[in-house]
Image (cartoon, rainbow, N blue to C red):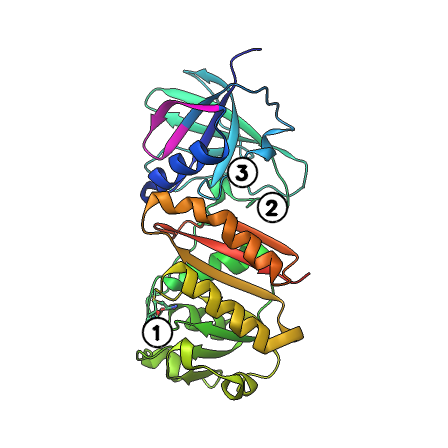
């Protein structure tokens, strides 16, 4: 078997989480070269371009097969290019099944890698849509929900969202400016920029005290967004409790799961299993650009 190297691009804050996840889920990968937030692993198993999709750690923003290292390379507009100093560049992938090249420029060398685009992957270079947070948005949670809804391609106009942990309001700001009606649950205060919106209602209490009457206020809720800073078990349980109260109207849940310590990645499988058991047919864990020691558990009914 020829030498096979797999390259993983992650967020700087999630390097330890990624290493832990790879050790746990892919013991046939052995750590090799790393540079900043790019880690390479040598594989003891044979992988080809059409089979590396089987390696999909939650904490990697891009997984690709190492092709070659060269000192001169002419970067094409379709190449995804990362030089570790500027925003990544390149045309987003457009077709499922398309071969995408990601070029990492490390000092004088160009590391050429490839992967196949699929509908489970972000089309953007190293999954970065290069979103910008508007000055008026009260928190960086704006970017998290903007990126997450971009990943699903879900339209927000005229949808009703139950947001758990909505203060100070970055996510609600994004959702209401996109035309969604938002019920925000949080015992903390909301920013005035959000309270001014006729589309926003503050359920000014902790999630544990939210009952069926509160939920009926939000008739037709089709989305739950949760970014509460609660221990993950509690956060997941409360989300599933809300999901049960909402019933059939609910379609999608965007749940940010905080894993303050890398060893906690071993609980991810349990989160996914629990979501499936609760009736969500499509469940996927993923990393967003704005994540720090956390991941997105995306749960869809259909
Ligand atoms: C990371 S912040 C959320 C940011 C927010 N989504 C935004 O868009 O600005 C976490 C929030 O969770 C809230 N929180 C913590 N425990 C909660 C609970 N039991 N019920 C509701 N909200 C809670 C906190 O008050 C805090 O405002």
Q: Residues within 10 Å of mark 2 (few under 14, many from 20)?
A: few
Q: Is mark 2 within 8 Å of ligand 1?
A: no
Residue 35 lies in the magenta stretch: yes
State how far apart marks 2 and 1 are (Cα).
30 Å
- Name the mark nearer the viewer: 2 or 3: 3
Q: From what the image shows, is residue 293 above or below residue 172? A: above
User: Are discs 2 and 3 less than 8 Å apart at CB?
Assistant: yes
Q: Could you tell me which residue is drawn at 59 percent across and 19 percent down?
A: 46
User: Which corner quadrant holds the C terminus?
Assistant: bottom right
Q: Could you tell me which residue is drawn at 49 percent across and 78 percent down?
A: 182
Disc 1: which residue: 167
State how far apart marks 3 and 1 are (Cα).
32 Å
Disc 3: which residue: 56
Residue 231 at least partly seen: yes
Q: Could you tell me which residue is drawn at 39 percent across and 32 percent down?
A: 38
Q: Could you tell me which residue is drawn at 38 percent across and 47 percent down?
A: 264
Q: From what the image shows, is residue 223 above or below residue 96? A: below
Disc 2: which residue: 120
Residue 287: x %, y % from top left = 45, 48
User: Which corner quadrant holds the N terminus?
Assistant: top right
Which stretch is magenta? 29-39
Label 1's element?
Answer: loop
Label 2's element?
Answer: loop
Residue 161 lies in the magenta stretch: no
Earlier along the polypeptide chain: callout 2 or callout 1?
A: 2
State how far apart marks 2 and 3 are (Cα).
10 Å
């Amino acid at each position: 078997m020829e030498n096979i190297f797999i390259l993983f691009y992650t967020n700087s804050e999630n390097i330890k989480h990624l290493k832990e996840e790879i050790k746990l889920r892919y013991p046939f990968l052995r750590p090799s070269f790393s540079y900043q937030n790019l880690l390479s692993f040598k594989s003891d198993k044979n992988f080809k371009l059409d089979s590396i999709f089987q390696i999909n750690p939650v904490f990697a923003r891009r997984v690709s097969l190492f092709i070659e290292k060269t000192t001169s390379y002419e970067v094409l507009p379709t190449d995804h290019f990362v030089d570790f100093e500027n925003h990544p560049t390149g045309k987003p992938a457009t077709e499922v099944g398309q071969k995408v090249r990601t070029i990492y420029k490390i000092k004088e060398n160009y590391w050429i890698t490839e992967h196949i685009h699929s509908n489970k992957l972000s089309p953007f270079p190293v999954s970065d849509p290069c979103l910008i947070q508007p000055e008026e948005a009260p928190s960086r949670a704006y970017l998290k929900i903007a990126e997450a809804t971009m990943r699903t391609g879900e339209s927000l106009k005229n949808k009703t969202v139950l947001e758990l942990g909505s203060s100070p309001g970055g996510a609600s700001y994004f959702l209401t400016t996109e035309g969604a009606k938002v019920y925000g649950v949080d015992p903390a205060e909301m920013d005035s920029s959000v309270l001014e919106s006729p589309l926003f209602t503050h359920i000014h209490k902790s999630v544990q005290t939210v009952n069926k009457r509160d939920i009926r206020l939000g008739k037709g809720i089709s989305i739950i967004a949760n970014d509460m800073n609660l221990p993950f078990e509690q956060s997941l349980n409360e989300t599933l409790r809300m999901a049960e109260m909402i019933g059939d109207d609910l379609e999608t849940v965007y749940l940010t799961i905080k894993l303050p310590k890398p060893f906690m990645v071993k609980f991810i499988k349990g989160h996914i299993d629990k979501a499936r058991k609760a009736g969500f047919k499509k469940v996927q864990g993923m990393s967003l650009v704005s994540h720090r020691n956390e991941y997105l558990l995306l749960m869809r009914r259909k």
